[in-house]
């Protein structure tokens, strides 16, 4: 690309970046503003409270919201880790050994595209039979199994870009299948695994329907479920709801900022670094 063309496209790129930032940050800024409003101010249409109610945040922190956020983080990270452990050998077998033929990947993805409500009763019955109903461990296992198709689907492309010669060289050196997979393939896929793990963890963190039916006790409820219970009274306090929502958003944004380098690197370069 010539310097003249880059100069001509720079204003367009800056405009697109500005619009993207505005679309992302303006709703968060307004959410923060609402979190400081009193009960009457939220329905008056003001953009900023003349008397910020910082007590909304304190009262929210005194509820079960912090515990529910920790539950969501535990289920999200644990489910993503188990999903990757299952997906790596699965995607590798599909790509390198054509396991299941050409239709296995599509067959794995097809149940994931169905409405989640159809799986609630079978999952509830299975968890009850093994004594994991209404537990955070049971929800974590459900998240792990539900998102395996997504992880396999995303990993396939990265594994196809791996040079086969590296695996052949490992076999010549005497490495078995498991040794070659975890000592050669996984290190090469590490940036991609981090990126896919973040995507799957965010899917788990935001999930609401399964968590609603599978976690009934306060000790095991996740953040989306706990947040929905803030509408319990007849006149909801939208300031407190906004404060709870903002607190729940913070871990996701913090993870996105902290893992930004691995996320971008994994999705763009992947295994061919």
Image (cartoon, helix red, strand yellow):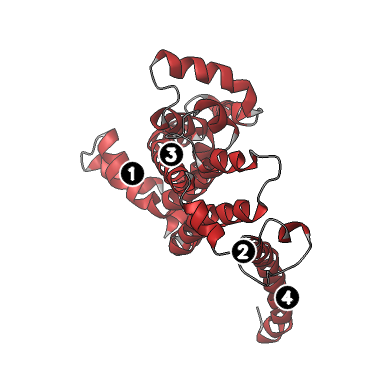
Q: CA distance from mark 3 to mark 2?
A: 30 Å
Instruction: Look at the image and tell me whether residue 267 can be seen.
Output: no
Q: CA distance from mark 1 to mark 4?
A: 45 Å
Q: CA distance from mark 2 to mark 4?
A: 31 Å
The residue closer to the viewer here, 247 or 249, is 247
Q: Earlier in the sequence, mark 3 or mark 2?
A: 2
Residue density around tag 3, few if under 14, some if 14–19, many if 20 or more, within 10 Å: many
| Mark 3 in CB contact with mark 2 (< 8 angstroms) | no
Residue 228: quarter of image: top right
The residue carrying mark 1 is: 167
Q: Earlier in the sequence, mark 4 or mark 3?
A: 4
The residue carrying mark 2 is: 36
Residue density around tag 2, few if under 14, some if 14–19, many if 20 or more, within 10 Å: many
The image shows residue 105 at horizontal and vertical percentages of 55, 31
Q: In the structure shown, which secondary structural element does the residue marked by tag 3 occupy?
A: helix
Image point 49% across, 58% down: which residue? 58
Q: In the structure shown, which secondary structural element does the residue marked by tag 2 occupy?
A: loop
Q: Nearer the viewer, mark 2 or mark 4?
A: 2
The label shown at residue 75 is 3
Q: CA distance from mark 1 to mark 2?
A: 57 Å
The residue closer to the viewer here, 206 or 217, is 217
Residue density around tag 4, few if under 14, some if 14–19, many if 20 or more, within 10 Å: few
Q: Earlier in the sequence, mark 3 or mark 1?
A: 3
Image point 42% across, 30% down: which residue? 141
The residue carrying mark 4 is: 15
The residue closer to the viewer here, 251 or 216, is 216
Judged left or right of residue 158, residue 31 is: right
Q: In the structure shown, which secondary structural element does the residue marked by tag 4 occupy?
A: helix
């Amino acid at each position: 690309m010539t310097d003249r063309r880059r100069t001509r496209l720079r204003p367009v790129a800056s405009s697109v970046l500005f619009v993207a930032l505005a679309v992302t940050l303006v709703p968060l800024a307004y959410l923060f503003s609402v979190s400081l409003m009193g009960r009457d101010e939220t329905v008056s249409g003001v953009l900023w409270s003349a008397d910020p109610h910082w007590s909304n945040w304190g009262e929210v922190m005194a509820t079960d919201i912090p515990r529910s956020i920790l539950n969501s983080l535990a289920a999200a990270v644990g489910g993503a880790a188990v999903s990757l452990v299952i997906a790596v050998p699965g995607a590798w077998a599909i790509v390198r050994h054509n396991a299941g033929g050409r239709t296995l990947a599509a067959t794995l993805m097809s149940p994931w595209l169905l409405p989640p409500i159809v799986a609630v009763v079978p999952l509830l019955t299975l968890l009850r039979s093994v004594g994991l109903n209404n537990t955070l461990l049971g929800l974590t296992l459900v998240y792990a199994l539900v998102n395996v198709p997504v992880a396999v689907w995303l990993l396939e492309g990265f594994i196809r870009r791996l040079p086969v010669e590296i695996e052949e060289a490992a076999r010549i050196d005497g490495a078995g299948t498991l040794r070659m997979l975890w000592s050669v393939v996984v290190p090469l896929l590490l940036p991609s695994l981090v990126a896919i793990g973040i995507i799957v963890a965010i899917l788990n963190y935001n999930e609401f329907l399964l968590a609603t039916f599978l976690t009934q006790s306060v000790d095991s409820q996740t953040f989306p479920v706990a947040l929905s219970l803030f509408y319990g009274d007849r006149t909801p306090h939208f300031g407190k709801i906004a404060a709870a929502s903002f607190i729940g958003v913070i871990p996701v944004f913090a993870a996105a900022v902290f893992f930004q380098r691995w996320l971008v690197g994994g999705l763009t370069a992947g295994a061919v670094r």
